[in-house]
Image (tube, rainbow, N blue to C red):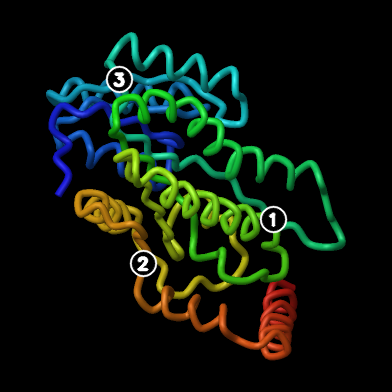
């Protein structure tokens, strides 16, 4: 069971959604928080609230798609809080991209944030973690990795890529005493999902989602996935024969498309 007491915890995407709520809950665990996001005004305000309530937090503006900004952020964290113990790599973007408006620049942005935004941090953290023989890397993926649904190809593919990458890291880093955890939420009420134009089954409040994630981290669960009905549905979809999936996904796409008119 992990103890957050006095640990230095880095969290990306701290300005909204799961990252924001998780930061609030972690502040009660007596750890030293480094809040990273592009929207500096929001994390400034959050850090102020945490510090005023007796916690410890610093806010650092950081675009996770930039290696230079990540290097700078890591340096600032070490200078202000000390060596990083836990990295929660949560920042993500998502766009619904249909064939009629196919846009490779949007897809590049999705992969730059969702995939390389984690890979760049891992690159910066590994040397210190390996030398110390300790550390924890927590990457936020998604149950959307299960299959390639219409208009969600870029987002789902980015999450599938990071799940496999984290799994590989977990296997390699075990002998160094470094823990790697993968978080796979279903639908959570966050700004990313608020833009969705389709029905989201088992939609969960962000406060509840953050509680589940924090509990899973404390228990050092290799994979933290929820809610159960969506987990089971995702597993079923993975094993569904392609011909049946194509029919199911195709009908769902048509239904959603016409329901918006």
Q: Position of residue 201 (x, y in %)?
A: 46, 75
Q: Position of residue 103 (x, y in %)?
A: 82, 49
Please tell me the numbered disc located at residue 51. none
Q: CA distance from mark 1 to mark 2?
A: 22 Å
Q: CA distance from mark 3 to mark 1?
A: 34 Å
Which residue is pictured at 40% across the width and 12% down the height? 76
Instruction: Determine whether the residue tagged by mark 2 lies in a helix, strand or loop.
Output: strand
**Labels 1 and 2: the sequence-earlier one:** 1
Residue 43 in the figure: left or right of residue 67: left
Callout 1: 10 Å neighbours few (<14), some, many (20+)?
many
Q: Position of residue 165 (x, y in %)?
A: 54, 50
Which residue is pictured at 56% across the width and 83% down the height? 239
Q: Which residue position holds label 2?
A: 226
Residue 214 in the figure: left or right of residue 229: left
Q: Which residue position holds label 1?
A: 154
Residue 89 in which image quadrant: top left
**Labels 2 and 3: the sequence-earlier one:** 3
Instruction: Determine whether the residue tagged by mark 1 lies in a helix, strand or loop.
Output: helix
Which residue is pictured at 69% across the width and 57% down the height? 96
Please tell me the numbered disc located at residue 83. 3
Which residue is pictured at 67% across the width and 62% down the height? 152
Discs 3/1, front: 3
Instruction: Determine whether the residue tagged by mark 3 lies in a helix, strand or loop.
Output: loop
Q: Position of residue 256 (x, y in %)?
A: 68, 76
* Residue located farthest toward the front when viewing the structure as drawn: 175
């Amino acid at each position: 069971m992990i103890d957050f007491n006095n640990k230095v915890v880095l969290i990306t995407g701290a300005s909204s959604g799961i990252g924001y709520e998780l930061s609030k809950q972690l502040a009660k665990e007596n750890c030293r928080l480094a809040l990273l996001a592009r929207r500096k005004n929001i994390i400034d305000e959050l850090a102020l609230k945490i510090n005023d309530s007796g916690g410890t937090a610093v806010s650092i503006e950081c675009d996770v798609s930039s290696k230079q900004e990540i290097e700078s952020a890591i340096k600032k964290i070490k200078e202000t809080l000390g060596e990083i113990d836990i990295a929660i790599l949560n920042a993500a973007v998502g766009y619904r991209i249909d064939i009629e408006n196919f846009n490779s620049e949007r897809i590049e942005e999705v992969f730059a944030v969702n995939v390389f935004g984690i890979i760049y941090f891992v690159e910066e953290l590994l040397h210190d973690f390996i030398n110390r023989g300790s550390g924890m890397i927590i990457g936020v993926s998604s149950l959307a990795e299960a299959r390639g649904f219409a208009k969600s190809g870029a987002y789902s593919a980015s999450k599938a890529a990071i799940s496999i990458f984290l799994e590989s890291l977990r296997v390699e880093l075990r002998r160094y005493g470094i823990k790697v955890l993968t978080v796979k939420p279903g639908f959570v009420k966050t700004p990313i999902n608020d833009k969705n134009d389709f029905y989201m089954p088992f939609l969960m409040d962000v406060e509840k989602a953050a509680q589940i994630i924090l509990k899973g981290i404390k228990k050092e669960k290799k994979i933290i996935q929820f809610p159960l009905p969506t987990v089971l549905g995702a597993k079923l979809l993975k094993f569904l024969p392609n011909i049946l999936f194509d029919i199911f996904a195709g009908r769902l796409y048509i239904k959603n498309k016409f329901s918006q008119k």
